Image: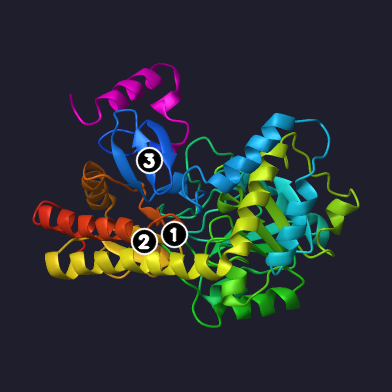
Amino acid sequence: MGRYDKSQAYHDRARRTLARGVSSAMKATQAPVPLCASHGRGSRVWDIDGNEYLDFALSFGPMLLGQSPAVVLEAVRRQLDSGIGFGAGNGHEAPLAELICEVVPSAELVIFSNTGTEAVQAAVRVARAATGRTRIVKFRGHYHGWLDSVHVSIPGVPGDGAGTGGQDPMAALYTTTCDWNDVGSLTAALADDVAAVVMEPINVNGGCFAPEPGYLEEVRRITREAGILLIFDEVITGFRVALGGAQELLGVTPDLTVLGKSIGSGFPLSAVCGSRDVLSVVASGVVNHMGNFNGNPLAAAAGLATVRHLREHRSAVYPRLDASMRAVAGAFERARTEHGLPVRFNHTVGAGFGFSSPGPVRTHEDRLRSVPEDYGVFAARMLARGVLVPARGLWYVSTEHTDDDLARCTATIVAVAEELVGQMSGASR
């Protein structure tokens, strides 16, 4: 039997009734076939063929505490014994909101949703109600979910248009795009009708680019003086780069923050938090924040257990995440310089992005010159050697990756580089 025969058979079956055979397009491009997982534990995932993988996909980011973290499962099992949903509040929502307000610098009030996409839309609605303005400014190469109003000028896609087929061309009528890390570009985009500027404070989705020194501080000054709200989309960076997110790490506090992924350890949970003044439009009922599953008992229990664990162990967790990703980045650099691997690797604390490119990748335009086919070949060879990495190139580390795991991963990166000498396009050499 082949290594992926059961995953292939499952995918063939799924395609008969599940469009494209997957529930999210991010999974569709995995080569040689989208895997069907059977279970996960700690730093590892197993597929239905019985193959074991070191996991650097981490469910596209949420599994900061690794697969099946005991502290989270225990909290969820306790809640399962009490009930799944009530059409009423539950005992986890207020403690979780209190904890978010304790650890996230911008947080004075919180509202819950289920996904990052939903939470971004809630933040935009709050900003419009709080300012009485309509327009939103976003940045090229930043990602804020798949809804039409912000799914424009997305990472890896040229131009300022829609990110996929079927989008309403009028939905982004009041969305203006500009270049990140460029104060002049932002200033030119601002007008009296701008309600908010939304950004990833570290552009993880576009390639793990850090803001230039002083850039966020200047954006904060400009928006405050203009009466424009600043929204940080910390769906990825929240709880991952620091307990308080990128705003804690970088020392700049927005008006509103969007949280997701890591907060729920795999359960569908997201949040918008921010100043009491701004979120008063929800507290007063001017904005009706609705959603049947918002703050549901299972997800809220998972979130509370996750954030409590991170708070209690923050002194060990965050230096470890940083060191782990630096080890991965160092292996890429050795593979590139010593063996000619045409794959570069950008990284920040707890996340990294691998891609092929003719040169360093520091801007959206640099990212557009990448060679996804080369990275796809590399990712498939890593998978064959037992290391699971996303086909799109965004790597994550967890608290469960041991020194031995990292040594095995870095050795595999170098081995694959040696194996691929002369077999890739060479476009990024």
- The quarter in which the N terminus is drawn is top left
Q: Nearer the viewer, mark 3 or mark 1?
A: 3
Tell me the CA gap for discs 2 and 1: 7 Å
Neighbour class for label 3 at 10 Å: few (<14), some, many (≥20)? many
Tell me the CA gap for discs 3 and 2: 30 Å
Residue 206's tag is 1
Above or below, 95 against 118 in this view is below
Query: What's the amino acid at mark 3?
Result: Val
Badge 2 vs badge 1, beta-carbon distance below 8 Å? yes
Residue interval drawn in magenta:
1-25
- Left-right relation of 11 to 232: left
Sequence-wise, which precedes: disc 3 or disc 2? 3
- Residue 346: which quarter of the image? bottom left
Q: Which residue is mark 2?
A: 367
* Residue 268 visible in rendering: no
Above or below, 201 against 88 in this view is below
Neighbour class for label 2 at 10 Å: few (<14), some, many (≥20)? many
Sequence-wise, which precedes: disc 2 or disc 1? 1
Secondary structure predominantly adopted by residues drawn in magenta: helix
What residue is at 25 percent from the left and 36 percent from the top? 32
